[in-house]
Amino acid sequence: GEAMPQALVDKIQKAKTFNQGYATTEYLAAALLDLGWHTLPADAPLQDVSKFEADTLKKFKVDLAEVPPRYRTTYFDHIWGGGYSAGYYAYFWSEVLDHDAFEWFVENGGLTRANGDTFRAKILSRGNTVDLATLYRD
């Protein structure tokens, strides 16, 4: 029945970002590898997959022994015919949008009915009827 000690609250808050650099680097390496494959010209010769991966990670300076690639080329089977086409980086943008939207709610009083109505009216109900970048900024 007692309030949680502030020291424990602080410790929990700090734990939210534990290992975030590692996770971001894994994600970034995957996105850059995806872009590497998709920026090869159509007439490029067949690539040795292991060499291409190593060269690409080195080129973008994410060839870190401390953060080995979590996603290898063979993991990307879904990007070739599934509409991703060098769009793996979109996961980063999704996180940016998510964080920005969350911050908007925090700055405007949290999860209130009025904020939900605003979000619905300005974003959710608009779909592709307005340029998405305009919706985002507005």
Image (spheres, rainbow, N blue to C red):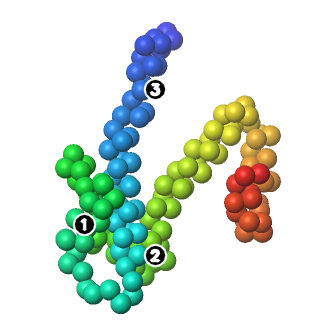
Kindly indicate whether the residue at mark 3 contacts the one at mark 2 (C-beta within 8 angstroms): no
Which disc number belongs to residue 13?
3
Instruction: Locate residue 111 relative to residue 34 in the image: left or right.
Output: right
Residue 98 is situated, as x and y percent measured from the top left of the image, at 58, 48
Instruction: Specify the amino acid type for callout 2.
Output: Ser
Estimate the spatial distance between the alpha carbons at disc 1 and disc 3, rounded to whole Å. Answer: 38 Å
Pair 1/2: label in front: 1
Q: Which residue is mark 1?
A: 55
| Of residues 138 and 81, the one drawn nearer to the viewer in this rendering | 138
Estimate the spatial distance between the alpha carbons at disc 1 and disc 2, rounded to whole Å. Answer: 20 Å
Q: Which residue is mark 2?
A: 85
Please tell me which residue is depicted at 62% across the width and 41% down the height of the picture.
102
Q: Is residue 44 above or below residue 20?
A: below
Please tell me which residue is depicted at 37% across the width and 79% down the height of the picture.
40
Instruction: Locate residue 14 relative to residue 51 in the image: left or right.
Output: right
Kindly indicate whether the residue at mark 3 contacts the one at mark 1 (C-beta within 8 angstroms): no
Q: Is residue 20 above or below residue 36?
A: above
- The earlier-in-sequence mark between 2 and 3 is 3
| Mark 2 surroundings within 10 Å by alpha-carbon count, few (fewer than 14), some (14 through 19), many (20 or more) | some
Please tell me which residue is depicted at 19% across the width and 71% down the height of the picture.
50
Pair 2/3: label in front: 2
Q: Is residue 130 above or below residue 94?
A: below
Instruction: Specify the amino acid type for callout 3.
Output: Gln
| Mark 1 surroundings within 10 Å by alpha-carbon count, few (fewer than 14), some (14 through 19), many (20 or more) | some
Q: Secondary structure at mark 3?
A: helix
- The earlier-in-sequence mark between 1 and 3 is 3
| Mark 3 surroundings within 10 Å by alpha-carbon count, few (fewer than 14), some (14 through 19), many (20 or more) | few
Q: Is residue 124 visible?
A: no
Please tell me which residue is depicted at 80% across the width and 40% down the height of the picture.
114
Instruction: Locate residue 2 relative to residue 119 in the image: left or right.
Output: left
